[in-house]
Image (spheres, coloured by chain):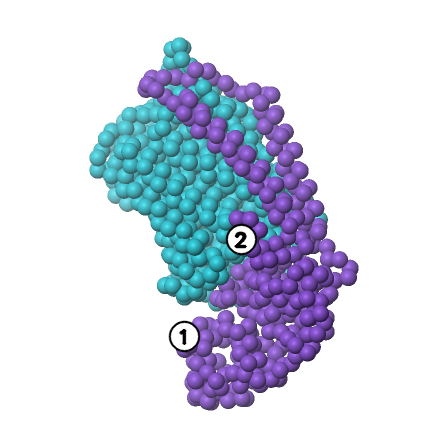
Amino acid sequence: MNDHAAHAHDDAHDVPFLEDGKGWKSWLFTLDHKRIGVMYLWSVLIAFAAGGVFALLLRLELMAPGKQYIEADTYNRFFTLHGAIMVFLFIIPAIPSAMGNFVLPLMLGAKDVAFPRLNLLSFWIYGIGSIMALSSIVFGGVETGWTFYTPYSTNTSGAVVMMTLSVFVLGFSSILTGLNFIVTIHKMRAPGMSFFRMPLFVWATYATSILQVMATPVLGITLLLLVAERTLGIGIFDPALGGDPVLYQHFFWFYSHPAVYIMILPGMGVISEIITVFSRKTIFGYRAIAYSSLGIAIISFLVWGHHMFLSGQSAYAGMVFSFLTFLVAIPSAIKVFNWTATLYKGSISFDAPMMWTLSFMVLFTIGGLTGLFLGALGVDVHLHDTYFVVAHFHYVMMGGTVIAFYAGLHYWWPKMFGVMYREGPAKFSAIIVFIGFNATFFTQFVLGTRGMPRRYYNYLDQYQPLHQFSTFGSWIIGLGFIVMTVNLLASFKQKVKAPANPWGARTLEWSIPSPPITHNFHKTPVVTEGPYDFPVEGQAASGAEGKHA
Amino acid sequence: MDTPNGYWMPPAASTVAQSVDDLYFVIFWLCVVFFFIVTGGVVYFAYKYRRKHPDQLATQQIGHNTLLEATWTIIPAILVIWIFVLGFRVYMDLIVAPGDSLEYQVTAKQWAWDFRDPDGCSVPGELHVPAGRPVKLTMRSDDVIHSFYIADFRVKQDVLPGRYSSVWFQADKPGTHNIQCTEYCGTSHSNMFAKVVVHTPEEFANRAQTFCKVTVGKEHGEKLYKNQCAACHTIDGNRLVGPSFKGIWGREGKMSDGSKVIVDENYIVESIRIPTAKVVEGYPPAMPAFPTLTNDDIASIIEYMKTLK
């Protein structure tokens, strides 16, 4: 027996995946999607903490106009790092790579992703890219903003080349993960799981993966051109050499607008899962939500110009981009209505994942609605590049994706680690973050509307009270996340064993023990019903047998 | 006239400002209504259908409802297309300058604005315009991308190197408003600040005798300092991008190439015309040239520097 210990079907592999191998090598060289997911999880959580610290330092500096604690150049480096870390090291990989890796094969009834080695490679690439990004701090820092606009980024000093190359490298991690998931979803669904029996998280991940594969190469090419411009002076973007700095913006946003949906779509998938489970209801409008994910993915390729209404692009281009931008609003609105309708006649409980989800519903609604101001050309002229934009995308990215990520983290935590956290502090942290978030960012809508430009180290005295209030809010957010972190980590000490299905969910990942065994399923499950076929009052619970192998 | 336009908006001081604000509030109230529909629904359902005992199940499973879904697709679609049309109309008013506009030339550079009126007159860091006439600014940048923004006028336009862009406005009442840079442009981005001064037509017509008079002397130098130099050089001894002007006159300084230089007239002229020729040790060669400053301007700056003991 021992000679064959490494073989897949050996009894030794019926141990939980967390105990299947000890030491750092068993993690760094694992091919288990769950272990890779867990490594991603810790990485993105560290990135979130680092990005968050920079955010708190920025807010602290903005307590009053003029110099408080740090120099202008330091401030500029900090907001660049905050943006770059949050976007490239945290939000983009957070839900797809950390949760997607863990949950997606389980939801499909598969034993792993389609290409486990490629999966590990993408984690390594992520690690290398992250180290490169952080090393730019010691190589002179970067103060271009996370958007690296030319010609500023080609003229200024600092480690711009290191930072952009790191983003180039990170892009490959994103592409490989996307590719892997697309093939996994097409080829590795359990018998009986048709496309329309897939959980909506899988649909969301599918749409995201398509975006990752199709859009990310454009960013890679753009950043390589930027590096070539900076080091060789090839003159693609430099007007003195016949180039065009606005071309860079077109290239950049051609990726980075779809990237916004790479960030939010997986969050929407998480919300679709949680809202059904905690109201014991089937999702309202399954097909509408699934198709709207794809609709968003397609239209998102055609709206990049709304970042450039004032860049000097033609009024007709502006008109077309504005129109298409409004079209994107519709599938997003449909999803919000569907989630709301899902609650109707349900049996709603308020466990921690649901608290985070309800917070998402409110914040994402505000984030989505305030996009209407910015899509309207005449109003955007006034609000463009002000704090209104900062507030808007924080409501979408943080109020949307980040809150959904933490909803998902509380939802799948018992599955991932086999332990339950304490419910009280978990709920409490969701509420604290919600309050702090609104204090911080709603204030910024007012600031922006009153004409406070973004990326400002210094500002006019009239904006000080609001800036101060926003800074106080950021401390409340910080407190909320500290409570959350301590509570989650404490669950490892308390060792309250998690049952296989603590929430009464019906998707396949809950049909196996918590934490799962290395090969997930003893026998491939056969799927006979949809992912949200909850029973109603007066009808005996049924169907569960069909889901178990 | 400098009272804010309601709680949200800054003063509405141009002819287009009110139409921007009106559209803003159309969208605002639409958002308020939709926000309360959604969160009202969420809160009401969450309360009404809360789980009262652990085994409670849903009372009904509803997969979808075609009529309802069509309704909440079509109504928002109509509304957003309506907002799009309104937004585009206001935008056309914002970008198409009337034919009889006064034409100004604007140059942006790190980190100052230079404005020239149709007669070629320029007041450092100040844009002087008449009330009641449309003004069109043709803008270019000497270095990186900047953006010209007057919040009170609701106008904004990126300013690019190697390409002209333009913006127009008409202010109907005399007054002073802030000009800010809204495209990140480096260290002193947030100090790239200027003023637009709106004059009565009579005041403006007499500008050659008043504010647009070419002057020489330390007062003029101080004004130039505030608008052109202060983003990088303090007068209180503190370090910004460049050395402080406090006590600079007549001082011997060490340059980055090791040479020593006495700060005199020739050094100042050279520093303004060819800033990289001699760079003070320990500072970056970050200063751009200021070709728009006249010889009289530079003489005035020198007079002002002499007062900074």
* Residue A531: % across, % down: 45, 23
Name the one closer to the observer, B82 or A123: B82
Chain that is coloured purple in the picture: B
Label 1 CA crowd tier, 10 Å (few <14, some 14–19, many 20+): few
Name the one closer to the observer, A147 or A516: A147
Q: Amino acid at mark 1?
A: Asn
Q: Is residue B253 left or right of residue B22?
A: left
Residue A238 visible? The answer is: no
Chain that is coloured cyan in the picture: A
What residue is at 45 percent from the left and 41 percent from the top? A399
* Residue A77: % across, % down: 43, 61
What residue is at 30 percent from the left and 42 percent from the top? A483
Q: Nearer the viewer, mark 1 or mark 2?
A: 2
* Residue A222: % across, % down: 56, 54
Indicate the quadrant containing the C terminus of chain B: top left, top right, bottom left or bottom right. Answer: bottom left
Same chain letter for marks 1 and 2: no
What residue is at 59 percent from the left and 21 percent from the top? B66
Helix, strand, or loop for circle 1?
A: loop
Indicate the quadrant containing the N terminus of chain B: top left, top right, bottom left or bottom right. Answer: bottom right
Location of residue B145 by image quarter? bottom right
Location of residue B255 by image quarter? bottom left
Label ID, residue A450: 2
* Residue A350: % across, % down: 36, 28
Label ID, residue B238: 1
Q: Amino acid at mark 2?
A: Arg
Residue A316 visible? The answer is: yes
| Chain ID of residue with mark 2 | A
| Chain ID of residue with mark 1 | B
